[in-house]
Amino acid sequence: MSWRKCGKAGRRHGRNGDEAGFVSVRPLLERLMDADVTIIGAGVIGLAVAAELSERRLSVYVIEKNASHGRGISSRNSEVVHAGIYYPAGSLKAGLCVEGRELLYELCLQHKIPHKKTGKLIIATTENEMDQIGQLMNRAMQNGVSSVCLVDQKQIQEMEPNIRAIGGLYSPDTGIISAHALMDYYLQKAKMNGAEIVCGTEVVSIETEDKGYRIGTLNGQGEGFEFTSERVINASGLHSDIIARMTGKDYTLHYCKGDYFSIANAKNGIVQRLVYPVPEKNHVGLGVHLTLDLSGRMKLGPDATYIDRVEDYKVDADKKDRFYESAVKFLPFIRREDIVPDMSGIRPKLQGPGEAFRDFVISEDMPGFINLVGIESPGLTAAPAIARYVKKMFDGMQSGA
């Protein structure tokens, strides 16, 4: 069997492990025969958990089906650091977002992870939408997001003279981050702590044993291998319900696709902050909004469209007119020809079309087996807080609490 270690190196290695950046296959397999902790999924959540748990000096293994870390939903999003405004008070999404935001900014400053606290305007373009702005303000207060404030039309014009709005909510603590740099930090921290990150390997079976779990895997060449693990963390994103069902826990995820369109570079600098309309009902999405990347490039999106269970990342160019009509209401400077298809992402939602809000699932559904299911937005912001949450659960397992 051939195993690929995660990292920037992308070459395959032979059975003697003779290429730089990889370990010999047999010693790795022998160590995998009795792992303390196995984390399934090397996205931002799995890597954050690995960085936390590896501090315990346990044998920690991260198994990733893709050829390298962070190729799924963690690298296909707006890279926004959310303040914690939208989510129902008392929910995991609200609490972990608020905690995660503070931890994330601290982490970025300490380890020089590229980021920028841009601030965000949630704007109303009609009087009816002003009622929703008031509701968002109340929810922000309930969630402990005390930095937000209501702004009127004149204040918005002073802040962003090139957008159109009659009022809104200003969040100074919202920002943007390099998701890839964050994941690289977590990856290197986990590896420095002794964690093994194994890519190109899919988990295909999980069976309970007296002292934990027997995990069956398959690599890209169709070669299989089984190993045992005392504890398992399911952080497999779009496939987390499939992994959970291997232990008999019945979750069902719904794929909700979001397309992005970029705005012509000539318009860069016209807007300095993120600009969002009022959100869609039941938290399906946050509406077609304006985001910035760290270079100042502007993008519109994502929208929210439920799709069949296929990882299709092709942007639907036919949505261009719809994006334009949505955006021109508050961005009067854009022209139809300014916007072009850019990228897309898929949210792993527990709520189906027309259903009410569903929270993150972070649950020890089997002894020593923690499922993280439906970790969509604000999962990137919440990642460091989710890792701490899981660590506390893990400590509870260890103590028998």
Image (cartoon, helix red, strand yellow):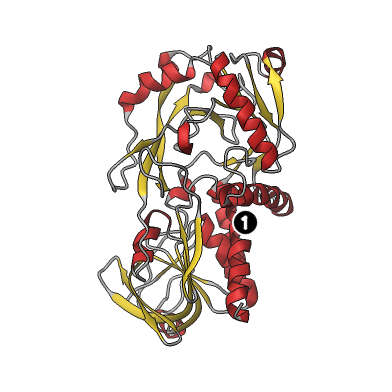
Q: Is residue 200 visible?
A: no
Identify the residue at horizontal 43%, vertical 52% (top origin).
71
Is the N terminus in the top left, top right, bottom left or bottom right quadrant? Answer: bottom left
Which residue is situated farthest in the left direction here? 222
Q: Is residue 118 above or below residue 241?
A: above
- Residue in front for this viewpoint, 319 or 376: 376
In the rendered structure, the answer to whether residue 134 lies left or right of residue 267 reads right
In the rendered structure, the answer to whether residue 242 lies left or right of residue 394 reads left
Q: Is residue 221 above or below residue 211?
A: above
Q: Quadrant of residue 224?
A: bottom left
Identify the residue at horizontal 30%, vertical 41% (top origin).
307
- Could you tell me residue 265's position as x and y percent? 52, 23
For mark 1, what is the residue? 384
In the rendered structure, the answer to whether residue 289 lies left or right of residue 140 reads left
- Residue in front for this viewpoint, 59 or 266: 59
- Could you tell me residue 282's position as x and y percent? 46, 37
- Could you tell me residue 156's position as x and y percent? 68, 17
Quick one: label 1, few (<14), some, or many (20+) residues within 10 Å?
Answer: many
Identify the residue at horizontal 65%, vertical 14% (top origin).
161
Which residue is situated farthest in the bottom direction here? 210
Mark 1 element type: helix
Q: Is residue 262 above or below residue 211?
A: above
- At label 1, the amino acid type is Pro
Q: Is residue 311 visible?
A: yes
Q: How many marks?
A: 1
- Could you tell me residue 76's position as x and y percent? 45, 44
Is the C terminus in the top left, top right, bottom left or bottom right quadrant? Answer: bottom right
- Residue in front for this viewpoint, 190 or 227: 227
- Residue in front for this viewpoint, 88 or 243: 88
